[in-house]
Image (cartoon, helix red, strand yellow):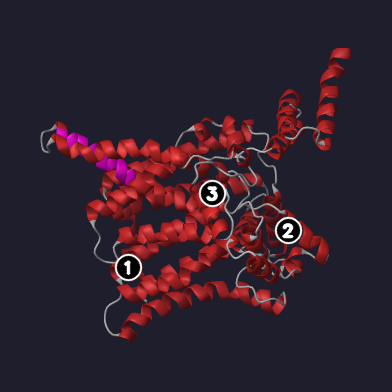
C-alpha cells in the first residue's frame, strides 16, 4: 500500500514537473493564444450573430437527443437504430447534465476542445517535422476561421476534428514505440472516431494491414498488434452495433443512414452534396415509407446497372468538390457568418491552406524521402488521403473536411518553414543563390494551384435558402432592415418564391408602421 502511494506521488510529481518545465513553455504559449482567440470569437458571435443559438436540422436532433440523455441518462427507444453517430449526443448530454442545457454550454465546451486540438496539431507538426513547422501550424490552427465557426454551433464537427487529430497522434506514437498499450489506445481512439462519424470505419482494415506491415517478427507476432488494435476499435463500437441490432432490429455498425447517404451521394442525378435529387423524391413517393425503411441499396445497384459509368463520373465530381476552394454549406454558411466576427474573416481557410498544404506534402516527400512505412510522414499523408476517400465515397460538404484541413495545415507549415529557412540560408551565404529555385517554384505554384482549385459553381456556396435563413434570424432579433436586405438577396437568386415574398412583405409593413405613426 505504501509503495503504491509512493508511486502515485512520484507520478504526480513528474506530471507537475512536465507541465511547468521549460519544454512545456511553447505549449502554454500556444494554449494561451488559442484560448484568447476563442474567447474573442465567442464574444463576437454571441453578441452580433443573429444565428447564434439557432438550431439547424442536425443541431435540433443533437440538442433534443442530448436533453433526453441529460434527463434520463439514457435515450428514447425511438432513437434506435441510431440515425447519427451516438457519441456527440452523449458528450453533449453529459455536459447538459452538469450545466445549463443550451448553445452556451455546447459552445464553451467545444471552445475548450478546439484549444486542445490546436495543441495536438502543434505537437504533431513538431513531431513529424520540426519546431518551426510546429509554430507555423500551431498558430495557423489557432486562428483558423472554419475551426472557430463550428465551435460555436451545436454540431459534431469540433468533436470529430479533435478525435481524428488525437487518434492520429496515438498512431504516430504507437508506430514508434510498438508497445501493446499504445496499440490499444490507438484502437480506442479510432473506435471513438467511428462513433463520432462512421466514415472512419474505412480506416480500421487499412490501418490493421499497415500495422501488420510495419511490425517485426514472425507472421503471428506481426498479426498480434493488428488484431489488438482492431479488437479495441471493435469493442468501442460494439455497444452501438448491439443496440441497433437487438433493440432497433437492424444490423447497423454505427448508424442506419448509411444506405440513404450512399444513394444521395452516388445516384445518377446526384450533385455530389447532401441534397435531395429528383430520383430520391420519386423513390420516396413510390415507397411511401421513412427513409430508413427504404432499400436504397437496391435502387442504387439498379441505377448503376443501367448506367455503369455514372459511378466513376460521380466519384470524379465529388473528388473535385472535396478539393475545390469553396466552403459548401450545410447549416451555417461561412460566407454569411464571417461578417459577425473579425476572426472569421482571417484568410487561413481551405482556399489558402489546401494548395500550400498539398505542395508542402509533395515537398516533404521530395526532401525527406521516407523509406519506411512507419515513418510519421507516411502515416500523416495516408491519413489525409484515406480520410478524403472516406468522404468522397459518400458526399461532400465543407464541414466534413475539417480533419483533412488539420493535416494540410501541418504540411502548409512545413512549406513555409522550408521557404523561410532557404531564404535565410542564402542571405547568410550558407547556400548558393540557385538553391532558391525550389522556393520560387513553390511560391509560383501556390496561387496557380489555388486558381485550379477555385470553385466553379458559386451557387453551391451561397443559395437563396442561406439568405432566407439569415433573414429569418435577423427577424427573430427584430433587426428589420437587415432582414429585408437578406430577403431581397434571396429573391434575386429565387425570383417569385412565395414564402420569400410573403415574409419580405411582412418586414416591409413593419418598417413602414413607425413612419405612419
Question: Visible in this render: residue 32?
Answer: no
Question: Dividing the picture into quarters, in which one does residue 281 lie?
Answer: bottom right
Classify mark 2: residues with Cα within 10 Å, few (<14), some (14-19) or many (20+): some
User: Which is more foreground, mark 3 or mark 2?
Assistant: 2
Is 442 left, or right, of 341 in this rendering? left
Q: In the image, residue 482 lies at what x, y percent?
A: 71, 26
Which residue is nearer to you in this view: 102 or 117? Answer: 117
Question: Dividing the picture into quarters, in which one does residue 223 lie?
Answer: bottom left
Bounds of the magenta segment: 413-426
Residue designated by label 3: 321
Q: In the image, residue 53 lies at what x, y percent?
A: 68, 42
Is 83 left, or right, of 124 in this rendering? right
Q: Residue at x 49, y 72 (%)?
A: 233
User: Which is more foreground, mark 2 or mark 1?
Assistant: 2
Which residue is nearer to you in this view: 388 or 403? Answer: 388
User: Which is more foreground, mark 1 or mark 3?
Assistant: 3
Q: In the image, residue 229 lies at what x, y percent?
A: 42, 74
Residue 495 magenta-highlighted: no
Q: CA distance from mark 2 to mark 1?
A: 46 Å
Classify mark 1: residues with Cα within 10 Å, few (<14), some (14-19) or many (20+): many
Count of marks placed on residues: 3
Residue designated by label 2: 279
- Residue 165 - label: none
Question: Dividing the picture into quarters, in which one does residue 448 lie?
Answer: top left
Disc on the earlier residue, 1 or 3 = 1
Disc on the earlier residue, 3 or 2 = 2
Residue designated by label 1: 175
Q: CA distance from mark 3 to mark 2?
A: 21 Å
Q: Looking at the magenta stretch, what is its main secondary structure?
A: helix
Which residue is nearer to you in this view: 277 or 348? Answer: 277
Q: CA distance from mark 1 to mark 3?
A: 33 Å
SS class, disc 3: helix
Amino acid at each position: 500500500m505504501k509503495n503504491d502511494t509512493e508511486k502515485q506521488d512520484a507520478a504526480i510529481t513528474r506530471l507537475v514537473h512536465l507541465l511547468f518545465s521549460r519544454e512545456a513553455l511553447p505549449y502554454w504559449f500556444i494554449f494561451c493564444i488559442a484560448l484568447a482567440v476563442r474567447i474573442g470569437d465567442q464574444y463576437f458571435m454571441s453578441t452580433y450573430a443573429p444565428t447564434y443559438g439557432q438550431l439547424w436540422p442536425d443541431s435540433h436532433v443533437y440538442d433534443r437527443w442530448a436533453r433526453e440523455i441529460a434527463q434520463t441518462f439514457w435515450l428514447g427507444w425511438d432513437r434506435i437504430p441510431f440515425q447519427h453517430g451516438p457519441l456527440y449526443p452523449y458528450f453533449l448530454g453529459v455536459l447538459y447534465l452538469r450545466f445549463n442545457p443550451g448553445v452556451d454550454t455546447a459552445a464553451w465546451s467545444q471552445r475548450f476542445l478546439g484549444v486542445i486540438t490546436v495543441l495536438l496539431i502543434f505537437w504533431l507538426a513538431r513531431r513529424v517535422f520540426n519546431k518551426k513547422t510546429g509554430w507555423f501550424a500551431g498558430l495557423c490552427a489557432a486562428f483558423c476561421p472554419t475551426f472557430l465557426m463550428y465551435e460555436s454551433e451545436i454540431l459534431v464537427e469540433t468533436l470529430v476534428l479533435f478525435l481524428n487529430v488525437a487518434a492520429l497522434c496515438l498512431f504516430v506514437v504507437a508506430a514508434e514505440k510498438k508497445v501493446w498499450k499504445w496499440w490499444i489506445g490507438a484502437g480506442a481512439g479510432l473506435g471513438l472516431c467511428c462513433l463520432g462519424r462512421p466514415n472512419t470505419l474505412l480506416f480500421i482494415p487499412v490501418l490493421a494491414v499497415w500495422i501488420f506491415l510495419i511490425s517485426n517478427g514472425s507472421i503471428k507476432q506481426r498479426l498480434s498488434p493488428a488484431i489488438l488494435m482492431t479488437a479495441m476499435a471493435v469493442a468501442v463500437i460494439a455497444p452501438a452495433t448491439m443496440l441497433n441490432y437487438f433493440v432497433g432490429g437492424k444490423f447497423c455498425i454505427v448508424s442506419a443512414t448509411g444506405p440513404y447517404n450512399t444513394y444521395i451521394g452516388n445516384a445518377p442525378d446526384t450533385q455530389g452534396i447532401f441534397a435531395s435529387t429528383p430520383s430520391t423524391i420519386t423513390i420516396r413517393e413510390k415507397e411511401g415509407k421513412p427513409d430508413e425503411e427504404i432499400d436504397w441499396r437496391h435502387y442504387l445497384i439498379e441505377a448503376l446497372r443501367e448506367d455503369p459509368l455514372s459511378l466513376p463520373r460521380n466519384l470524379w465530381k465529388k473528388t473535385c468538390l472535396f478539393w475545390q476552394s469553396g466552403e459548401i454549406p450545410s447549416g451555417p454558411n461561412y460566407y454569411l457568418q464571417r461578417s459577425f466576427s473579425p476572426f472569421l474573416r482571417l484568410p487561413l481557410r481551405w482556399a489558402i491552406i489546401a494548395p500550400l498544404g498539398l505542395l508542402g506534402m509533395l515537398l516533404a516527400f521530395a526532401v525527406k524521402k521516407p523509406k519506411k512505412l512507419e515513418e510519421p510522414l507516411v502515416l500523416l499523408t495516408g491519413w489525409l488521403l484515406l480520410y478524403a476517400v472516406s468522404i468522397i465515397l459518400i458526399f461532400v460538404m465543407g464541414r466534413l473536411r475539417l480533419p483533412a484541413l488539420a493535416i494540410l495545415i501541418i504540411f502548409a507549415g512545413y512549406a513555409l518553414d522550408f521557404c523561410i529557412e532557404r531564404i535565410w540560408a542564402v542571405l547568410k551565404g550558407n547556400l548558393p543563390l540557385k538553391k532558391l529555385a525550389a522556393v520560387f517554384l513553390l511560391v509560383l505554384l501556390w496561387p496557380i494551384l489555388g486558381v485550379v482549385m477555385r470553385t466553379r459553381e458559386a451557387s453551391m456556396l451561397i443559395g437563396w435558402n442561406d439568405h432566407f435563413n439569415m433573414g429569418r434570424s435577423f427577424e427573430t432579433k427584430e433587426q428589420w432592415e437587415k432582414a429585408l436586405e437578406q430577403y431581397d438577396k434571396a429573391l434575386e437568386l429565387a425570383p417569385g418564391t412565395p414564402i420569400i415574398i410573403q415574409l419580405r412583405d411582412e418586414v416591409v409593413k413593419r418598417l413602414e408602421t413607425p413612419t405612419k405613426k
